[in-house]
Structures are given as structure tokens and as C-alpha cells.
Image: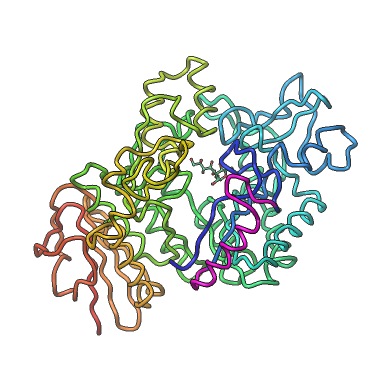
Amino acid sequence: MDVIWVSPIYASPNDDNGYDISDYQAIMAEFGTMEDFDRMLEGIHARGMKLVMDLVANHTSDEHRWFVESRKSVDNPYRDFYIWKDGVDGKAPNNWGGCFSGSAWEYDATTGQYYMHLFSKRQPDLNWANPKVRDEIFKMMTWWCDKGIDGFRMDVIGMIGKESFEDGKVAPGALYGDGSPFYQHTETTHRYLREMREKVLDKYDLITIGEAGGGTGDAIRYSSLDGRELNMTFGFEHTDGINEHTELGKWSDKGAPLDEVREIMNRWELDLQGKAWNTVYLSNHDQPRQVSRFGNDAPLWREKSAKMLGTLLHMMRGTPFVYQGEELGMTNIYFKSIEEYKDVEVFNAWRQWIDSGLVDPTDMLRWYAKIARDNARTPMQWNTEKHAGFTTGTPWIRVNPNYLEVNAETEVNDPDSVFNYYKKLIELRHTHDVIVYGDFEPLLTDDPSVYAYRRTLDGETLTILLNWTDRTAPCALADDSLGETLISNYDAHKPGSLYPYEARVLLKRG
Ligand code: TEU
């Protein structure tokens, strides 16, 4: 591992697992003190690694002192740190829905106005149009850079440049309008990012990763090789974009079909090639466990498919991101009741669709079990001790009962584990330039079972073959003539075919 991205550890009431910050320059008590942070940073650097912090600057917590002041009166010096507007005919200023269900506006009786919150009502959006807000954020970023951190992952950075507050289109069956054309990927956002680069980023040697979403055109603008904005961005097309997206948003029975995932990931590789640097991931704290969603978490196939997915990600062009527990092949937890969940995104959707009687609770619980964010937030499974060694207290959310088989201690000591397979993948990236810099070329793009692509650089050709299914699949490329097998999740191979979830990487020189 080269870089550690740590989710928000700042002071926060935890309405949204720390993405609601009440003090950008203090550490959340549950995680320790600033001295603990300093020791951690020193230890990371001593091991030759870097630390990327999570910059959450589109919004703060409603407990941040800026918002506490802002809501006191319409003429408070901090009023314009946030987006306040009068209601229209006793309703919200416009018809925008929020990303966590409900309206994007909350009425505040103290001053009789509404404030905007694209996420939970306890996450008021900052008003980036106010230069004082930008200066305060840039000052805070500088403070962290002077402490020696190595970069920022920038939360929903594509939303900071709100340009208009007119009503959005209301999709059939939707309860609110879509405001995203007026706040996502605007020219104003790009202008703020260039200002951030000039006033902060260019003064340090930083890794800058935008959680921006959008299409490849947006990614190229945010992370073009001219270095005027960011180094790379996260796209959501292959993780959120493949969802059903009915009026219920992402909540549906739809899975992650190979042809859709492959088309999107290949398109991002090809569109960005030579223009911008890609990020490569299937997991993070907002997504379900990848082996449950894209692979097969049945005990018979969990390890094989986890290794196959790891191969897909680590042989691609772009920076692979390994989410905590992915390297163990951790799985969804399959909660059975709403009471087991902790996520504000889950609770808000429940209130909007179940409490209103619009959706059957059985359906919603089935969808939550597939793709709710809490699936990836269950405690890290360290060992076979109580609570998987995560705590001697009471875990904040239930531990996945499969921790007796799936845990770090067992896997570190098992040469055939997902963990040790990931170590080999990372080692290969460190020793083969063709993996990092090689041109990307899709193969077998219509194959119903096999995801295949080729990487080439300086006379070296890497052929990556991945059977996405639980059945042996025919594959003419699975042949020793394509070179030595660099890595595979099977010890033996059948010429002309791939075993269930078989990953095979062949390297040919000259
Ligand atoms: O997520 C942005 C975002 O769009 C999320 O709503 C995510 O895409 C969605 O949950 C997936 O279905 C960022 C953070 O990663 C997330 O944890 C925060 O909740 C959110 O911003 C607000 O800060």
C-alpha cells in the first residue's frame, strides 16, 4: 500500500458518519486526540506511505460554529456562509430533492427562512459564492498541509458551484425536482477549484482526488493532465449509474450485469487515456461489499470471485483504491430489520417511502440488504475473538457473523487467502510498468461471461482474462501462447476455457 485515505476523523455529531463536521481542526473524541493524529501521521511517513485526508467542504454540520451563528439572525456576520432563501407560497424556495431523500431545504423558524442541505438536514450547504467561505476553507486546508498531510479526497466537490436555484425537472413518479443541472459540474465549480489550486494546492506536493461523479468529459475537465484542478476523480457510473434509478433512486432489485459494468469501465479507460488519470474502484464506504454485489459471496465462490475482482481492478490503467476489508473479501451483512441499520440515507428513504405507505417494507429491506451503505461499514474483522477483535466494548453496528472465517489474522497467515493475493497484485503493480502505464485495449467486449482486456508498453503485452460467472466459460484467449501466467486464482488451467471466477493474467515479452 502506498497511500492511506482516511474518512473524516474531525469533530462531528456523526449524523452522517463524520461527513457532518463541527470543527475542521479538531479530532473526533472517539478517534483520539490531535497528538494521536500526529503520531499516526509520523508512523505513516516512517513506513514510506502517505496520508490523504477527507475534505468535506460542500457542507458542514449544523453544529459548526459558523452555522450556529448563521441561523441566529438574517444580519448575522455568518448569515451568508450558508444558502438561505425565503419560501414561496409557504413552501420551500424551489422543488429540489436532496441526495438523502426529502426536500433539499429545511425551514428555520428563528428567522423564517429556509436553508439548503443537499444531504441530511444536519448538513447545511456552505455558500461558496461568498469569498469569506472560500478563504476560510483554503485557510483550513493550508493548516492541514502545514501539518504534513499528503493530499485530500474532496467530498462531493462537483457540487460547490451552485449557479441557479430555479425548479428542476420532476421525473415520472418522483416527489421532488432534480436540481443537479444547476449545481453539478458548473463552470463556477471549476473556477473555485482553480482558485483552490492557486491559493493552496500548488504550494505543496499533494495528491488531490475529487469525489465528483459526472461523465468522462467531466472527469477530463477536473483532472486534465495540465494540472489546473485535480489529479484524479471518482466516477459513479459503474457503481451508482448502473442502478435502476426509478423515482426511488438507487433502491431496486437490479444487479450489476457484466455487460453494463464492462461497457462503463472500458469507456472510462479509453476516454481518459492520454487526457486524464483514472481512479479504479468497486468499493468504498458508500457502496455495498463488492464481492456481494459484483462477485459471489457464497462460501464456495467468495474467495475466487474476490480475487477475480481484485485482478480486474489492479491490472487496469489508473490508481486502484482498496477499501478496508475488501482485501479480506469481506461481504454484505444482510440485515433483516430496519432497526439494525445506522445510515441516515437508509432512514430518510424509509421515512419517505415506507412511512408514507408508497413502498412495501419487505421490498425496501431486500434492497437495503443488497446495496445499503451500512453493508460496507460493519466493524473490521481483525480475528476470531469476540466482536472480531474490533472492540472490547459494544460495537456501534453489528459485526458480520462470518468473521470466524473472514478475518485479517486468519488471512495474513494463509498463503492462499484473498489478503495474500492482494499483496501479490500490489507487488506486480510496483514491479511492472506495463500495468501502471501500458495502453488499455478492451477484448471480447460482447462475451457473455468473460471480461478481458489487454495492456501494452515497450514490447510487453499483458492479457487479462476474468470469468465473471460461476460456470466454466469458453475463452480462446486462455492459451499459453499469450505468455507466462503472471498471476491467477487457480493453480492449473484448461486451455481454451476459464474455470468459474477464474482470473488469469498472461505476460508476453517481445
Ligand atoms: O457521498 C456523495 C454521494 O453522492 C453519496 O450520496 C453516495 O454517492 C451515495 O450514498 C451512493 O449511493 C459523499 C460521501 O462519500 C458520503 O459518505 C456522504 O454521505 C456524502 O458525500 C455527504 O457528505
Tell me where residue 390 appears, x and y as whole percent.
42, 45
Tell me where residue 208 appears, x and y as whole percent.
59, 63
Q: Is residue 244 above or below residue 11?
A: above
In depth, the one of 300 and 387 nearer the eye is: 387
In depth, the one of 168 and 245 nearer the eye is: 245
Give the magenta range.
26-49
In depth, the one of 40 and 1 nearer the eye is: 40
Q: Quadrant of ligand 1?
A: top right
Residue 30: say if magenta. yes
Tell me where residue 361 appears, x and y as whole percent.
41, 20
Q: Is residue 371 above or below residue 485?
A: above
| Residue sitting at x 67%, y 50% | 57
| Residue sitting at x 24%, y 52% | 303
- Quarter holding residue 478: bottom left
Please tell me how many numbered marks the rendered image carries: 0
| Residue sitting at x 81%, y 53% | 131
- Indicate the quadrant containing the N terminus: top left, top right, bottom left or bottom right: bottom left
- Quarter holding residue 59: top right
In screen coordinates, is 133 left or right of 434?
right
Q: Residue furthest top?
A: 357
Residue 80: say if magenta. no
**Most common SS among magenta residues:** helix
In screen coordinates, is 296 left or right of 319?
left
